[in-house]
Each structure stands twice: as C-alpha cells, then as structure tokens.
C-alpha cells in the first residue's frame, strides 16, 4: 500500500464521520472581493495568527513561570538560565504588542470601510470587546515579571479606576488584592491572564470568526456602487489562503527579527519602598488614553476634573462602539460623512496624544 | 590620524556609510543581476516569438536605466564621500594599493552606463540581434564591475599573508594580485553573483506586478513565474557558498560567529550571530512569500506584494552588509588597520609617543591656522581648541564605532561605573591582553598613560556629570 493510498483511506474515514468534503466544497465556493483596498483584509488573519503564537509561547512560559513572591526570580531564570527561554519570552512580549497593533489596524480598516453596518453590527461589537480583552491581556501580562518598570507602571495604571466616583477605590482594591500592588496582585493578574481572559476571549473570537464567515468581507462604498458584473473576487481556497499564509510568514519574520535583535528586557526586581524610577509610563497602547486623561486633568484640575475627564473619555468610547447604530444608511449622507470625520479625528487624536505622551516623558 | 574626524552625533559616522551602502548594494547588485536578466529575457522572447514580452521589456529597461543609472551612481559617489570622511586612513590605503583596480573599475562603469542607455534607446530602432548584443555587452561590463570591486572589498577582510608581509614598506602595490585574489575572493564573488540574480528577480517582480492580470493573464503569469525562478539558484547554492566563505575567514574572525552560536541558548550571543540569524530567517521568508504570493498566484500578484518582497530583500541585504562589517572587527583592514584607523604595527609607537601628537588635524588644527595667519610671530602658538584632550582622543579612537548618547552609546554602556572603574576599563583596553573578552571585536586603546587619564576624565564627565553646577563637562586645555 503506497503512502498516497494510506492518506486517501484515512481521509475517506475522516470524511465519512466529519463531512470534510462538504467543508472543502464550502471553502472553494467562498470568495473574497478584489479591489484597491483588499490589502486591509489580511489584518484580521494576521491578528489571529499572532494570537495563536501568543497561546503557544504562553503555554511554554507557563511551564517555568511561578506567580506570587517568586515571580521575578522565575522570569529571571526563564530569561537567563533556561535555554532559549529569552527567545520564547521575547516572542511572547513582542507578539502581544504586534497583535494589539494588528487589532488597531483591523479596527480602523473596518471602520473606514463601513463594515459595521447592517448586517455586521455584531461583528463590530464583538470586535470591540475582543480589543478590550486584548488590552486587558496586555495590562495583566505586563505586571507578571514584577520588575521595577512593570511594578510602578501597574501602580500608576491602577490609580485610574480610583477616580471613578464611589465604586472606584473598591474596584482598584479588588484588582490589587489590597491597598497596594503586591504579590497578591500578581496572583490575581496571573489568574486573569491565563484563565479568565482566555475563557472569555476564545469563545468570543470563535463567534467573531463565525460572523465573518456568515456575512463575508464588506467592500468599500466605491466598490459597492459598481454593478455586480464589474466587481472582482477570488476564491478563498486556495487563492486567498495562500496570500494569507504569505502574510503570516512575513509577520513571523518581523516577530523573529524583533525577538532576536531586540530581546525583551528584564529590569531590576521591584522594591516597593524605593522611589519610582524616572520616566515611568504606560505601554504604547495605553499611552493615548493616559495622555488624554492627563491633558483633561490639566484643563480641569482637582477631583471634579478627574471625573469630568473620565466621563468625557467614556463618552468618546461609547460613541465609537455604538457607531453601527447611528451610521446605518447605505447612502453616503450627512451622518456617514460625520462618522468618517469622527474616525479621522480618532486616528489623529490617538497618534497625536501618543506622540505627545512619549515626547513629554523624555 | 592625519585627517580631521567626522563627528556625527547620535547616529555615528559608521551608520552614514551603512545607510548609503545598503541602499547602494540593493541597486548596484540589481545592476549586475538585471544586466543578465534583460538579455536572457529578450533572447527567450525572440526565440519564442513573444511580442508581449518584448513590449514589457522596453518599459522594464527604462525602469532599469533610471534606477541603476541615476540612483545607483549617486549612491556610489555617496559611499566614496562617506568612507573618505569616516575612514580616511583606510580609504587612502585602498586607493594607493588598488590604484589600477579602481581605474579598471571606472572604465567598466563607463561602458556599463553607456550600454544601458544605448540598450534602452535602441529598442525597435536597430536590428534585434544587434540589440541583443548590446545587452550582452552591458551584462559583461556590469559583471566585471562586480569582479573588480569584490577583490577590493574582500581584501579588507582577508588581505592575505603575502600582502601583509609587505604592508607598510611602500611596496604594497607590488602584491596587487595577491591582495586582489585574497582568500575570500572566490566564495564572496559567487555569493554576490547569487544575490545579484535574486535581486534581478525581485526587482523584475516589481515591474511584472504592474501588468493588469485581468486583461493580460498569460503575459503576467509567465513573467511573474519566470522572475520568481531567478531566486531559486541562490537559495540552493547560498548555504554551501556561505559555509565556504566562513571556512576561508581567519579563525580569529570566525570566533565572533562561533562564540555567538555557542551562547545562543542563554541569549547572550553576539550581534553578528543575531544578524546571521536574520539573514537565514529573512531569506527563507522571501522564498516562502515569493512562492505563495507570486508563483502560486501570478495573476493576482500586485505591486504591494512585490514591494513586500523587496522590503524583505532590503532587510536581508542590510543584515548581510552589517554582518560583513562586523566580521572584520576589530579591524577595518584585516590584521593591518584597526577599525579606528590605527595601523597595527604603529600601536606600540603611539603608546610611547602619545595619540594626539599624531593627530594634528584634530588637536593642532588651530595652531596651524594661527600660524598661517601670522607666520613668524612666535607669540602666536596659543594652541587652544574647543575640545579637551580627552574629547580629541574619544573622537579619534572611539568615534568610528561609538557615540556618546546615540548608537552604541558610551554613556549608557559605562553607566553605573565611577571614575576609577571607567579608568580600569580603559586600562584593560589599553593592555589588550589576548584573553580579554573585548580582544575579539574592539581595537586596543592606544596612547600614553596620560592619554588614558584624559579619556577617562572626558568619559567620566559624561557618565557621571557634575549635577549641581550644571557646567559643561568638557575641559578646554592647551596642547
């Protein structure tokens, strides 16, 4: 019996039980639109690929990481003692940053393609929740090494919920496991990072992907205006999949480049009694909200200012999330234009406040 | 040491060469590979009667002419400008040693540029066979430019024992051919030929990606697939050629790489090993991406895809050139001149006489200027400069590879050390013992004990600045 015959009989056996032929037929039938903005379709796939890498490297780190009082020592061992531990840790940290970048690009491409309109509202909303969960992944994972920088940055970050009226301090205390950031906080963040967040993220991701399969890729308004006969498309299997794979290979190369040439640093062990080192700042994906709140705090000083800042900021986010419900007409009317300007303003504010944030901490 | 130093704060002068060189290599090696691609593609089109290919090749040869003839030549001059300022001593050695080599090189340049222009402007104006001959002349001339420059570039890594035996005697040019056909000449030439072929394919993909696959699927498919095939030979041969190249590199240089591989597991491996990894990874990515994006999907292959492959090639080229530079450490010309321009046999002499006495342009420049303004006036030689002695030594001995606060920043690298500690570190570089961990990749600190003290003072003033006074740490002193 040749290898080909063995493979064929295994496939037949599986096909009979799992209906693989139907899946293959479905994949062949599925098409992806081809137009000038097709490039943006890859970013969802890149995000998914980076998430899978996160899971793989995360499980490997889990083998040696010890939360609690030994957190720093275990990360030190992973980085400097375990063979290729530095690589796995660097790949995990860099993949997290790249994934958040890919999510942001994906979100803005969906926004400007108006891919949140009927019937894709749930795709947009689930994407927003996935972004929030990814940010939580980043925040909780950042503390886990318990070095000087992560300790003080988390301490500053957890001051933000304190500004929420009445319930703020209680939320902050619950997250910290007490009035200050300690090994109990690491324990909580660890549980959040490896159990709670994945338990929420993975089913929601599956739902998000199912919605993408169900409704297909949205096309820009200029493409939608064309008659159906003039629109181009390509089969998902194998044409688009091959391109997706090429994008994944490029992403892997960029990740490998960053992880090996700029390995993720491990600072000094934290000392709760020591003064915070100079230049403490949040990670780049939190820099914009951090800077916006700082600016609003400067305009409206005091507790009232903090509350007003939070309210204003929350209002902006709510407006962003609810965009499918007030920009729903297919025609390019006043609301659609306003939504477009709102998107441009968001991009500008995000970039400007991030740059200002880094500029001011120099 | 006989020349002024070019101080580029933060970036460092080495990176000025690096940036221009990476850009130049991407184009000049394309000029060689593309020189072969064009006549071969034309011959194929003529034999198979592919009129559509010929039309496409006209446009491609225009792109080729503009890119290589304009940007290639400008960046080439840029390299001369940058190396002349950054490494004047090494540039001087290369000019003096290879004066006829350079002359031959420029003859080929002229033939290359002329035939590239004739090739483009005579499409459909002269007999097809004659046009093809012009293409072959171009291919030959451009290959010869590589054949010549490769001898000079490899000389810098492995000048060979025969040349080293006469170096410094004034008879160096008598060993021209030994220096030219040095130990790494052949593996390097073949490696570069392979890279040229790959770049020809990659740049051709840029041109082919612009063909409308909807209206000309056959043309696009055949050109894209044919161009991808240009990547194959190099990726098959490169591992073997690279191994041959490394085998010919002196053991002392190879140790930089092998040490890096040994310590890779614990993450402390050397920069050159990281760069070597990058070359391997990116080369594999280029093949994978070219296969999936271009070879398997030729009709849908668009300019964005082609640019992605080109950018990957840029990363691989940059890593390759960086590795080649790193492999030469601590020399700029193997075993003859250290990377800061100090000739190896003169190090002992400088240790006795002092560094600054040999650096009139840096230290005594104002004296010369003052003397020229008032010749004969004995009261004039108040040789003050805007530098301290320490800064002058820093610029001369450290500035080729380090900056104070930018690339390879000494302020950061020495952070946490007090004055005594900085002095003992510099003294260690001055002693330059064979078992020193820095022996493999850093030149010795040459000069007298006073020079060590002066450099220590200068670096200490920057690493541990006097916080309260806020005054500039540099002490202006007299010669």
Image: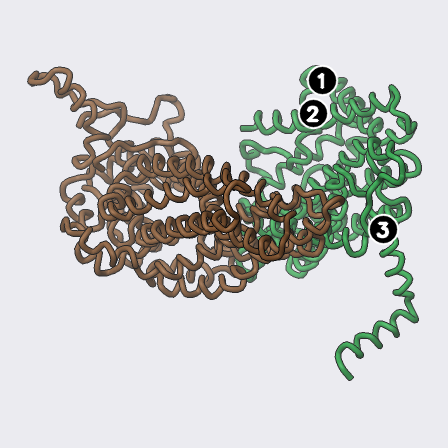
Residue A294 place in picture, x, y as percent: 67, 23
Q: Looking at the image, which is closer to me, B340 or B92?
A: B92
Judge from the rendering whether residue A66 lies leftward or rightward of residue B373; answer left or right: right
Q: Which residue is mark 3?
A: A206
- The residue that mark 1 highlights is A302
Could you tell me which chain the residue with mark 1 belongs to?
Answer: A
- Decide: few, some or many residues near mark 2? Use Cα within 10 Å; few <14, some 14-19, many ≥20: few
The image quarter containing residue B373 is: top left
What color does chain A have in the rendering?
A: green
- Tell me if residue A135 can be seen: no
Q: Nearer the viewer, residue A316 or A295?
A: A316
- Near mark 1 (Cα within 10 A), the count class, few <14, some 14-19 or many ≥20, is few
**Residue farthest to the front?**
B127
Q: Chain of mark 2?
A: A
Depicted B450 relative to depicted B430: above or below = above
Q: Is residue B95 visible?
A: yes
Query: Do tags 1 and 2 sit on the same chain?
Result: yes
Residue drawn at (71%, 53%) of the image: B297
Q: Residue at x 56, y 32 (%)?
A: A279
Q: Identify which residue, B463 or B193, lies in the foreground.
A: B193
Residue assigned mark 2? A348
Q: Quadrant of residue B390?
A: top left
Single out the mark in the foreground, 1 or 3: 3
């Amino acid at each position: 019996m040749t290898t080909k015959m063995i493979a064929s009989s295994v496939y037949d056996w599986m096909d009979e039980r799992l209906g693989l032929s139907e899946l293959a037929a479905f994949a062949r039938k599925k098409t992806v639109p081809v137009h000038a903005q097709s490039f943006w379709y890859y970013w969802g796939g890149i995000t998914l690929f980076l998430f899978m890498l996160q899971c793989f490297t995360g499980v490997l780190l889990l083998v040696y990481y010890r939360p609690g009082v030994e957190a720093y020592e275990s990360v030190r061992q992973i980085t400097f003692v375990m063979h290729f531990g530095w690589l796995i840790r660097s790949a995990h940290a860099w993949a997290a940053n790249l994934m958040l970048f890919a999510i942001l690009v994906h979100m803005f491409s969906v926004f400007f393609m108006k891919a949140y309109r009927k019937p894709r509202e749930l795709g947009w909303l689930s994407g927003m929740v996935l972004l929030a969960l990814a940010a939580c992944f980043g925040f909780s994972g950042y503390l886990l090494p318990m070095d000087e920088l992560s300790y003080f940055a988390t301490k500053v970050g957890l001051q933000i919920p304190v500004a929420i009226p009445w319930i703020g301090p209680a939320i902050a205390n619950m997250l910290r496991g007490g009035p200050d950031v300690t090994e109990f906080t690491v324990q909580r963040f660890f549980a959040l990072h490896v159990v709670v967040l994945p338990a929420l993220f993975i089913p929601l991701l599956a739902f998000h992907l199912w919605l993408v399969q169900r409704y297909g890729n949205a096309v820009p308004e200029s493409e939608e205006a064309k008659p159906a006969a003039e629109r181009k498309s390509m089969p998902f299997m194998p044409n688009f999949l091959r391109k997706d794979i090429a994008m994944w290979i490029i992403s892997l190369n960029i990740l490998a480049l960053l992880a090996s040439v700029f390995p993720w640093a491990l600072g000094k062990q934290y000392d709760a009694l020591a003064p915070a080192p100079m230049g403490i700042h949040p990670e780049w994906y939190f820099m914009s909200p951090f800077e916006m709140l700082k600016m609003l705090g400067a305009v409206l000083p005091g507790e009232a200012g903090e509350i007003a800042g939070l309210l204003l900021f929350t209002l902006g986010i709510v407006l962003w999330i609810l965009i499918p419900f007030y920009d729903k007409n297919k025609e390019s009317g006043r609301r659609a234009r306003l939504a477009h300007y709102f998107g441009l303003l968001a991009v500008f504010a995000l970039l400007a406040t991030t740059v200002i944030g880094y500029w001011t901490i120099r | 040491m006989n020349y002024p130093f070019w101080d580029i704060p933060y970036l460092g002068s080495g990176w000025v060469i690096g940036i221009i060189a990476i850009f130049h290599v991407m184009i000049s090696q394309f000029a060689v590979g593309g020189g072969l691609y064009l006549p071969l593609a034309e011959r194929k089109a003529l034999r198979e009667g592919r009129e559509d290919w010929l039309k496409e090749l006209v446009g491609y040869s225009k792109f080729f002419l503009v890119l290589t003839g304009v940007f290639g030549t400008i960046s080439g001059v840029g390299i001369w400008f940058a190396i002349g300022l950054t490494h004047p001593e090494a540039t001087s050695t290369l000019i003096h040693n290879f004066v006829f080599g350079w002359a031959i090189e420029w003859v080929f340049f002229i033939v290359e540029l002329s035939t590239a222009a004739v090739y483009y402007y005579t499409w459909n104006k002269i007999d097809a066979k004659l046009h093809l001959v012009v293409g072959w002349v171009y291919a030959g001339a451009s290959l010869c430019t590589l054949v010549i420059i490769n001898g000079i570039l490899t000389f810098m890594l492995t000048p060979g024992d025969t040349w080293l035996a006469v170096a410094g005697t004034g008879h160096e040019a008598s060993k021209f051919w030994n220096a030219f056909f040095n130990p790494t000449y052949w593996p390097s030439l073949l490696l570069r030929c392979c890279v040229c072929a790959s770049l020809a394919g990659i740049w051709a993909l840029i041109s082919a990606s612009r063909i409308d696959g909807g209206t000309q699927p056959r043309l696009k498919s055949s050109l894209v697939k044919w161009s991808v095939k240009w990547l194959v030979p190099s990726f098959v041969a490169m591992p073997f050629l690279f191994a041959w190249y490394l085998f010919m590199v002196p053991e002392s240089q190879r140790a930089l790489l092998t040490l890096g591989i040994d310590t890779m597991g614990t993450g402390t491996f050397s920069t050159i090993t990281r760069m070597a990894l990058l070359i391997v990874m990116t080369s594999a990515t280029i093949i994978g991406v070219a296969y999936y994006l271009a070879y398997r999907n030729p009709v849908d292959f668009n300019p964005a895809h082609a640019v992605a492959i080109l950018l990957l090639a840029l990363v691989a080229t940059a890593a390759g050139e960086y590795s080649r530079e790193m492999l030469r450490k601590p020399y700029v010309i193997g075993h003859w001149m250290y990377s800061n321009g100090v000739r190896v046999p003169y190090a002992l002499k400088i240790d006795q006489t002092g560094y600054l006495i040999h650096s009139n342009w840096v230290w005594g420049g104002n004296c010369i200027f003052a003397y020229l303004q008032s010749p004969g006036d004995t009261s004039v030689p108040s040789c003050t400069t805007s530098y301290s002695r320490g800064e002058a030594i820093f610029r001369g001995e450290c500035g080729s590879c380090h900056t104070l606060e930018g690339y390879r920043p000494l302020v950061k690298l020495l952070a946490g050390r007090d004055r005594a500690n900085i002095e003992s570190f510099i003294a260690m570089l001055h002693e330059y013992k064979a078992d020193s961990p820095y022996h493999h990749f850093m030149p010795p600190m040459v000069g007298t004990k006073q020079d060590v003290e002066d450099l220590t003072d200068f670096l200490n003033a920057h690493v541990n600045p006097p916080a309260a006074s806020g005054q500039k740490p540099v002490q202006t002193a007299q010669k």
